[in-house]
Image (cartoon, rainbow, N blue to C red):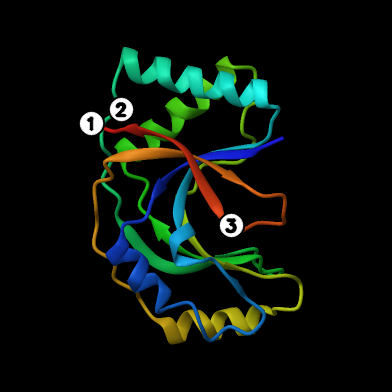
Amino acid sequence: MPRLFTGIEVPPLARQHIALLQSGLKGARWIEPSDLHITLRFIGDVSDADADRIVEALDDRVRLKSWAKPTIVPGELSAFGGEKPRSVHVSVKADVGLVALQRSHEVVMQRVGLKAEGRQFVPHITLGRFSGDVQPPQVVAYLSRAGGTVIQPWEPARFVLYSAGDSTGGGPYVPEEVWPLG
């Protein structure tokens, strides 16, 4: 049973910049630079038949209408989890095109029979994840040392259907299918 999600790849120059930020936080499991991405729609574990239906639905959507290229505007470093930090990430501006792309992926997934995503879309690039042994003061110190990162905006040429192994998060992520944007 594959674990799937759709996403946008992070280009090489941005990956290099992010890789320089992936140190100095004890207990973090850093994401491999080659696996950095912006998740559009987490799909989860599905049967091979469902995976085929998802690919067909995305193929059909691309044939009927192309998706516009969003502008990806990376922002500051931040963390998810508050008092129980789970991860650090680079925020991404919720550009109108990016939000529209994510919403259309949500519609496609519901049409193939998947449940609606319960979480609000918060675009970001995860740098690292951690378990309960990382405390909020450590995360705050890391974020303040790393400062306001600057990664140049980009327009992605495509989006990807990724597969991931069974785990608590992280790669390796395998691009299974790609579709053009614009």
The residue that disc 2 covers is: 67
Label 1 with label 2: CB-CB less than 8 Å: yes
State the residue at coordinates (29%, 55%): 73
Which mark, by number, is residue 182?
Answer: 1
Ranked by sequence position, the earlier of labels 3 and 2 is 2
> How far, Cα to Cα, is label 1 from label 2?
6 Å
Question: Mark 3 belongs to which amino acid?
Answer: Gly
Question: Mark 2 belongs to which amino acid?
Answer: Trp
Q: Is residue 140 left or right of residue 61?
A: right
Nearer to us: label 3 or label 2: 3
State the residue at coordinates (58%, 22%): 52
Q: Secondary structure at mark 3?
A: loop
Q: Give neighbour class at mark 2: few <14, some 14-19, many 20+ (Cα, 10 Å).
A: some
Q: Give neighbour class at mark 1: few <14, some 14-19, many 20+ (Cα, 10 Å).
A: few
Residue 179 lies, with reference to residue 162, above or below; the image says above
Question: Mark 1 belongs to which amino acid?
Answer: Gly
Count of numbered circles in the view? 3
Label 3 with label 2: CB-CB less than 8 Å: no
Ranked by sequence position, the earlier of labels 1 and 3 is 3
State the residue at coordinates (30%, 36%): 97
Which mark, by number, is residue 174?
Answer: none
Residue 2 shows in this picture? yes
Residue 154 lies, with reference to residue 16, above or below; the image says above
Q: Quadrant of the N terminus?
A: top right
State the residue at coordinates (43%, 26%): 104
| Towards the viewer: 15 or 88 | 15
Q: Which of the 4 image quarters holds residue 13? A: bottom left
Which mark, by number, is residue 171?
Answer: 3
Could you say where residue 83 lies in the image, as x and y percent from the top left? 70, 70
Q: Secondary structure at mark 2?
A: loop
| Towards the viewer: 74 or 175 | 175
